[in-house]
Amino acid sequence: MDKDIFQNIIALIDDLSEKQRDLVRKALDGGDDLERLISIIENPLATKRECFYCKSENVKKWGVSHGLQRFRCFDCGKTFNALTGSPLARLRKKNRWMEMALALREGLSVRKTSTQCEVSVSTAFRWRHRFLKAAAADKPVKLDGIAEADETYILESFKGQRKLPRPARKRGGKAKKRGLSREQIPVLIVRDRNGVVIDAVLRDQSKDSIKSVLSGKLCKDNILCIDGGKALWGFVNEENIPFKLIPPGKHVHEKNPIFHIQNVNGYHQRLKSWLARFHGVSTKYLANYLGWRRIYEKPKAILTQTAWIQVAMGIPNQQLMRT
Ligand SMILES: [Zn+2]
């Protein structure tokens, strides 16, 4: 930390109230996880208290349940708490959630997550996907300036499903056929030069499936660098998005090297080598892993446990969206 900022912090200690001093002590000791968690979870309702169902502000405190303040709406009569409607609603063992946030921040395997959070492996797995659900869905609404788009393919896995549509492969495994086949799931990554990423598991390799992901997110002010695959090419033409074709296998535009798809290809590589640690991810959950990676790429300094809890609750985090 910058020396001047540190000196300022020391100078500010004099002005702390006794309660604030206690909170600082707790934060320095690692704090009381549950207390920290509850204050993160309840912060949005503390700032703006309105009914989850009808948005009325005519709400009153209505007891405490599972550690969370409950509210009752006097317009629609329903009760709710800060987690109502979020993927984390009704998950138990809140005192372990800060550890779960840490496990996501560090990208831990399910087994290591289970150890870190002191929960069973099956709970760790269930938590992972509850915590990632909102992250997977919360995609940037637009990309700025030059952007790069390219598809990659992830080996299909039926891990976690009881009835396999084909005989099991050993851990991770290899596709039976080389190259593209039905075992390879197409994944689209589009990334602008600010590092903002849109990812998606594609239904198929058609122009329409690209359109369902990107329509409205790019405009005439963008220049999309693509490698000439049929689906992307069809999309930019139909939507009149300015584009630059990067020759296959070249990664860089021949006349103007500012146009390239090196960033997005680098992203593909990082994604794939990172996925390897999970020994084959189930296709059903692939979108969650894409969301996890998208957030995992943010600078660690802003990707705190607090930020992860907010992401899991589906609270938009301005800092995370910008960087
Ligand atoms: Zn209401």
Image (cartoon, rainbow, N blue to C red):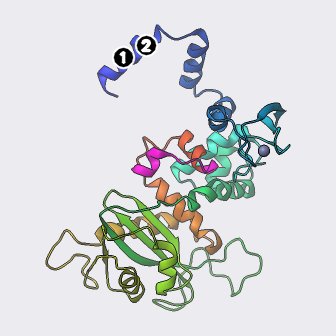
Where 132 sits versus 116, above or below? Answer: below
Instruction: Report the front residue among 217 and 99.
Output: 217
For this orientation, the residue located farthest to the left is: 255
* In this rendering, position of residue 301 left or right of residue 18: left
Q: Position of residue 290 (x, y in %)?
A: 52, 65
x, y percent for residue 174: 53, 82
The picture quadrant where one finds residue 217 is bottom left
Q: Which mark is residue 8?
A: 1
Q: Does 230 appear in magenta? A: no
What is the number of the mark on residue 12? Answer: 2
Quadrant of the displayed image that contains ligand 1: top right
- Residues packed near mark 1 inside 10 Å, few (<14), some (14 to 19) or many (20 plus): few
Q: Is residue 239 above or below residue 132?
A: below
Region of the chain picked out in magenta, as a range? 312-323
Q: What whole-number distance in Å separates the C-alpha atoms at marks 2 and 1?
A: 6 Å
Q: Secondary structure at mark 2?
A: helix
Whether the magenta-drawn stretch holds residue 319 is answered as yes
Question: Which quadrant is home to the N terminus?
Answer: top left
The answer to whether the residue labelled 2 contacts the one labelled 1, judged by CB atoms less than 8 Å apart, is yes
Name the residue located 55 percent from the left edge and 58 percent from the top edge: 138
Mark 1: amino acid: Asn
